[in-house]
Amino acid sequence: MQRADVVDAVVAERDDATLVVSPGASSGLVFARDPHPATIHNMELGYATAVAYGIALGRPDRRVIALEGDGSMFAGIQVLGTLARFPVSNLTVVVVANGIWGTGAGNVATTPGSAAQLAEIARACGHPAGRVLVTAEAPELRTILARAKSEAGPWIVCAVTERSSTDRSGARPRVQFDSVEAIDLTRRYLRSK
Amino acid sequence: MGGSAAAIHAGLVAAGIEFCLYLPDSGTGALTELLEADPNITTIVCAREDEGIATAAGLFVAGRRAVVVMECSGLGYAGLILARCRLQRTPVFVLASHGGIIGEPFDYHAAPIAAARGIVDGLHLDNIVLRPGELHDETIRLAFQTVENHRTSMVVFMPLYLDEHRAAR
C-alpha cells in the first residue's frame, strides 16, 4: 500500500467528516484529491490528533478524522493516553506508517518503531484491541474506515505503507490555500451543520 | 490560591467556559477542584500542556469555549502550537500558575518561569498577572472577552502569593 492509497481510502470513506492532516505529503495529497471545506492541512508535527480530538469533543454529533504520519504520531504519542482515558466515539485516527520521516530525501527512519509497536502502545494506553487495527492492504483499510462510520470509536488505524516518491520534500502536491482560510472554512462548515 | 480560586472560577463561568483542559499543579489545585465539581464544565486531564492547547484549539474550531489550566512550565512545551494558533487566528485562553516574579519559594521554579516568559514574550502573546485584592472574576471574564473577540491567545498568570495577603492580615 502506498501513501496515496491511504489518502484515497480516507477520502472515499470520509463523507462529511472533518479532517485534520499532519504536515507534509499527506496534506498535499488530500488537497489534490478532495476539496472538502472542513479540512485542516499541515497541522504541526505531533498535534493533528490532539486538534482533531478537540473538534470531536466539541462536536460529538460530527465524525472527525486525524490523518497522521507515524513520525507525527510518535511525536505526540501521549495523546493516545488522554484519548483512552477520556474517549470520544466520533474520532478516527489513521496513521500512515512508512517508517521514515517524510522530509528531505525521505530516507531517514523514524526513531520509535513499527506500526505494530505503535498499535501495541495504543492498546497499552487502554484502547480496546478491537479498535486498534493494523493493515497493509488498501481494500481492508477501506473496510475498516467504513466500519468506523457506524461503530463507536475512537478508532486507531495503522496503515502500513511502502516508501514512495511523495515522501520527499518537493515531490509532493502542495496545499493551495493558507491555514487561516482552512480554519475559517472548517469553522463555517461546522457551524452550518 | 484558595480564596482567589472561587473568584477565578466565577469569572470562567461568567465567560461561558464549557471545557477545561488541565494538568494538575499545587498552584492551580483549588481552581481545578472547583472546575471538576462544576457540572456545566467538561474537564479533561491531559498528558502534556501543549496537547491541551492543541485540543483547546480544536474546541475553538468546533465553536466551543475552553480554558487551559497549567503550571507555567507547560508553556515551555507549547511554543510551536501556540505559534500555529497565532498564525491561524485560533485563540487559546491559558491560566498558568507562578509567573509573578516575586514570592517564589523554590529555585526549581525558576526554569519554568523563564521558559514561560520566553514563550509569552517571544510570541508577543497578550498576558496579565493577577494581583492580590483585584476583582479576579471580572478580570477573567474581561480577559476571555478579548480572547474571543480579538481571536488572540492570552496567558493569565496566577502567582502563588495571590492569597497570601489574606493569610497575613
Image: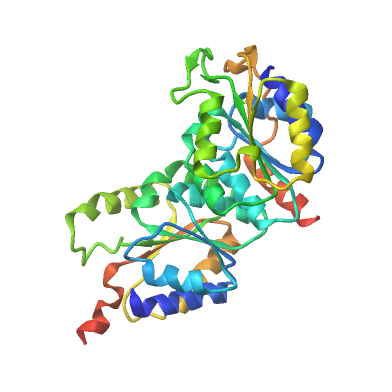
- Residue B11 image position (x, y, % from top left): 50, 75
Determine whether A86 is above or below A2 in the image. Answer: below
Q: Quadrant of residue B151?
A: bottom right
Whether residue A166 sits left or right of residue B142 in the image: it is right
In the rendered structure, the answer to whether residue B160 lies left or right of residue B121 reads left
Q: Which residue appears at 61% of the width and 48% of the height?
A: A53
The answer to whether any part of residue A33 appears in the image is yes
Residue A123 position (above or below residue B58): above
Residue depicted at 58% across the width and 41% down the height: A49
Residue depicted at x 30% and y 67%: B159
Residue A21 x/y as whole percent:
64, 35
Q: Residue furthest front?
A: A129
Q: Residue furthest bottom?
A: B169
Question: From what the image shows, is residue B12 above or below residue B65?
Answer: below
Query: For this rendering, which residue is in front, A32 or B150?
Result: A32
Q: Quadrant of residue A96?
A: top right
Q: Quadrant of the C terminus of chain B?
A: bottom left
Give the position of the N terminus of chain B as an image quadrant: bottom left
Residue at coordinates 67% horizontally, 20% vertically from top-left? A136
User: Is residue A35 visible from the viewing direction of this image?
Assistant: no
Task: Point out residue A18 in the picture as x, y percentages from the top left corner.
Answer: 72, 44
Say which of A61 and B83 sits in front. Answer: A61
Q: Exactly how many numbered labels are in the figure? A: 0
